[in-house]
């Protein structure tokens, strides 16, 4: 019995499944490189959180150093206390504040890189 010519076998091929990409999806890094609105939003979010961190440090610094002239004016006879506070009492909180700021800024940048590299 001969086969009907309309019943031919057809081989269907296509790109490998791993190489297939959706056309509507861009990685955030591409968005930033192409300076699209979404890329601008990503960069602005990093800048905003870094600004918030910097303003927090500034506020703590103002609360820490700002009242010192009033304290020193209230006790004019305590010159040694002034030098002790300025020389020894002020530096440990400043160092701790600086360490906190650097760690926070690095963590913000690490989170941003993780978001951009899509990990």
Image: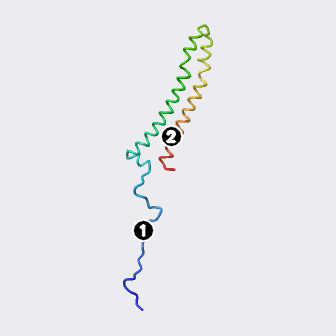
Furthest-bottom residue in this view: 1
Q: Which residue is mark 2?
A: 109
Instruction: State which tag comes first along the sequence, 2 or 1.
Output: 1
Q: Secondary structure at mark 1?
A: loop
Position of residue 98 in the picture relative to residue 46 (left or right): right
Q: Which mark is residue 14?
A: 1
User: Could you say where residue 33 lies in the image, as x and y percent from the top left?
Assistant: 40, 46
For residue 108, above or below residue 83? below
Q: Secondary structure at mark 2?
A: helix
Q: Which mark is residue 48?
A: none
Position of residue 80 in the picture relative to residue 51 (left or right): right
Of residue 87 and residue 31, the one placed in the foreground of this image is: 31
For residue 69, what is the image quadrant?
top right
User: Could you say where residue 43 lies in the image, as x and y percent from the top left?
Assistant: 43, 41
Position of residue 48 in the picture relative to residue 83 (left or right): left
Disc 2 + disc 1, Cβ < 8 Å? no
What residue is at 52 percent from the left and 23 percent from the top?
62
What residue is at 40 percent from the left and 47 percent from the top?
31
What residue is at 49 percent from the left and 46 percent from the top?
115
């Amino acid at each position: 019995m001969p086969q009907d010519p309309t019943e031919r076998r057809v081989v269907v091929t296509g790109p490998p499944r791993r190489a297939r990409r959706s056309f509507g999806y861009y990685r955030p890094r591409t968005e930033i490189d192409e300076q699209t609105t979404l890329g601008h939003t990503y960069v602005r979010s990093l800048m905003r959180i870094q600004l918030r961190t910097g303003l927090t440090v500034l506020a703590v610094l103002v609360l820490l150093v700002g009242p010192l002239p009033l304290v020193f004016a209230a006790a004019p006879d305590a010159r040694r206390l002034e030098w002790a506070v300025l020389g020894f009492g002020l530096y440990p909180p400043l160092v701790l504040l600086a360490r906190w700021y650097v760690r926070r800024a690095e963590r913000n940048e690490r989170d941003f890189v993780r978001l951009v590299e899509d990990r």
